[in-house]
Amino acid sequence: MADITAKMVADLRAATGLGMMECKKALVEAEGNMEKAEEILRIKSGAKAGKLAGRTAAEGVLAYAIEGNVGALVEVNCETDFVAKDAGFVAFANSVAQTAVAQKPASVEALSEAVEAERKEIIAKLGENMSVRRFELIDTQNQLTAYIHGALATEGVLVEFKGSEDVARKIGMHIVAAKPVCVSEAEVDAETVEKERRIYTQQAIESGKPADIAEKMVEGRIRKFLAEITLNGQPFVMNQDQTVAQFAKENDTEIISFVRYKVGDGIEKKEVDYAAEVAAAAKV
């Protein structure tokens, strides 16, 4: 049996990014043959990625890519915020965004398939399940910019606009902070408006107001509701004395559309008992 030196283990670890014990076991199995050991690790890493697939990936990051007039915003999930901060994981997320722009896949399944080899490789290195949860492309004749909030990169927006990129990016920051549903009132679903109208009308009736006053109250509340959920109607976060629409207009800029994501929206996170996991691992 060949002697397995610390340098051999270190070299294999540097080549694969896997753990020291995994590398040592592979070298022992390969009887010191580095090439065979790397092949063993690749095989086992693929199996490892499969075993992890059932775990809930609710943490993660957002990433974007813009190439000319095509842009993509993607959400890539992992299991823990620790891995979400890892440079390798962040690089993978950026690669996913670049692939989305380059290939313009028709679905998240198609995008996931395009980056599957990279996904398995980073899973093998970091030991957590990861998935491409969602993405959106904007392919336009207009301009594009993006804003990702904070070091954790958990909230962000891709903005389609005409005019000043600096102004559009500031409005992108506003979108992350104020969370509008759409750009203008014309884009608000009619059913949503009608639902609010019914609620406000009933409230006005129950308050005992005369019909003409009740009608004015309802219309006033509808206007307020639309201002609250539309980008153009919201007070601009950097200057509450003007709306976003006013800020954009005075700077010769128009926001056409946007995509806003927050990592983990809608995912039910599992509570993990890490003490129990460690105890179980110690018995192996």
Image (cartoon, rainbow, N blue to C red):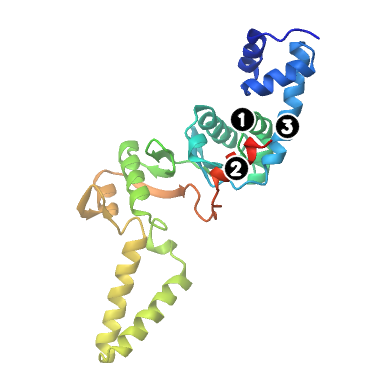
Q: What's the distance in space between the residues labelled 1 and 3, CA to CA?
A: 11 Å
The quadrant in which the N terminus is found is top right
Q: Is residue 71 above or below residue 32?
A: below
Q: Identify residue type, mark 2.
A: Glu
The first of marks 1 and 2 along the sequence is: 1
Label 2 crowd bin: few (<14), some (14–19), many (20+), radius 10 Å: few
Helix, strand, or loop for circle 1? helix
Q: In which quadrant is the C terminus drawn?
A: top right
- Report whether residue 64 is seen: no
Return the disc, 3 or 2, that comes first in the chain's sequence.
3
Identify the residue at horizontal 29%, vertical 52% (top origin).
244
Q: In this view, does 102 lie to the left or right of 50?
A: left
In x, y percent, where is residue 210? 25, 92
Who's the residue at 33% across and 73% down the image? 222
Q: Residues within 10 Å of mark 1 (few under 14, many from 20)?
A: many
Residue 188 lies, with reference to residue 62, above or below; the image says below
Q: Name the disc covering residue 122, or none.
A: 1
Q: Which label number is shown at residue 46?
A: 3
Q: In which quarter of the image is residue 25?
A: top right
Residue at screen point 56% across, 42% down:
79
Residue 30 percent across, percent down from the top left: 79, 16
Residue 145 sits above or below residue 17 on the image: below
Q: Nearer the viewer, mark 1 or mark 2?
A: 2
Q: Do the residues labelled 1 and 2 touch (CB within 8 Å)?
A: no
- Tell which of 38 and 163 is nearer to you: 38
Disc 2 is placed on an element classified as helix
Question: Can residue 255 be seen from the camera position used here?
Answer: yes
Residue 168 falls left or right of residue 257:
left
Q: Name the residue tied to disc 2.
A: 277
Q: Mark 1 vs mark 3: which is more N-terminal?
A: 3
